[in-house]
């Protein structure tokens, strides 16, 4: 079995507001720790190495999201994303 981590260093600029638990420094440090322990491979041969393969995140469609989430949940996230600071 191979594992992939959808991650880009550009995600460090993502801001959901000061009260949101997903802080960029939290996941940046987590990825740095994975790299330090050689758990994350940046090369395509990662599955053979036993390490997780890093892949660039891609934009998905609503239909893609609804393969794994209820329509109402997708609506709620879209509504919250219009002004992420309004919920804090």
Image (tube, rainbow, N blue to C red):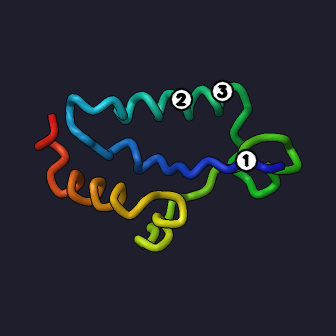
The residue drawn where x is 22% and y is 51% is 80
Q: Which mark is residue 30?
A: 2
The disc, 3 or 2, on the residue closer to the chain's N-terminal end is: 2
The residue drawn where x is 21% and y is 37% is 17
Comparing 7 with 88, the one in front is: 88
The residue drawn where x is 47% and y is 34% is 28
20 with respect to 34 (left or right): left
Comparing 20 with 53, the one in front is: 20
Q: Which residue is mark 1?
A: 3
Q: Which residue is mark 3?
A: 36
Marker count (numbered): 3
| Residue at disc 2, secondary structure | helix
| Residue at disc 3, secondary structure | helix
Quadrant that contains the C terminus: top left
Q: Position of residue 69 (x, y in %)?
A: 47, 58
13 with respect to 42 (left or right): left
Q: Position of residue 12 (x, y in %)?
A: 38, 42
Q: Which mark is residue 73?
A: none
Labels 3 & 2 near each other (Cβ < 8 A): no
Please, is residue 46 above or below residue 60 in the view? above
Q: Residue furthest right?
A: 48
The disc, 2 or 1, on the residue closer to the chain's N-terminal end is: 1
The disc, 1 or 3, on the residue closer to the chain's N-terminal end is: 1
Whole-angstrom CA distance, mark 3 to mark 2, is: 10 Å
Comparing 51 with 16, the one in front is: 16
Q: Position of residue 82 (x, y in %)?
A: 17, 57
Q: Position of residue 43 (x, y in %)?
A: 73, 53
Whole-angstrom CA distance, mark 2 to mark 1, is: 16 Å
């Amino acid at each position: 079995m191979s594992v992939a981590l959808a991650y880009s260093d550009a995600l460090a600029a993502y801001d959901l507001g000061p009260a949101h638990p997903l802080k960029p420094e939290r996941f940046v440090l987590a990825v740095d720790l994975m790299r330090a322990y050689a758990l994350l491979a940046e090369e395509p041969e990662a599955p053979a190495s036993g390490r997780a393969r890093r892949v660039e995140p891609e934009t998905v469609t609503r239909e893609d999201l609804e393969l794994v989430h209820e329509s109402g949940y997708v609506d709620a996230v879209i509504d919250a994303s219009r002004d992420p600071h309004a919920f804090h």
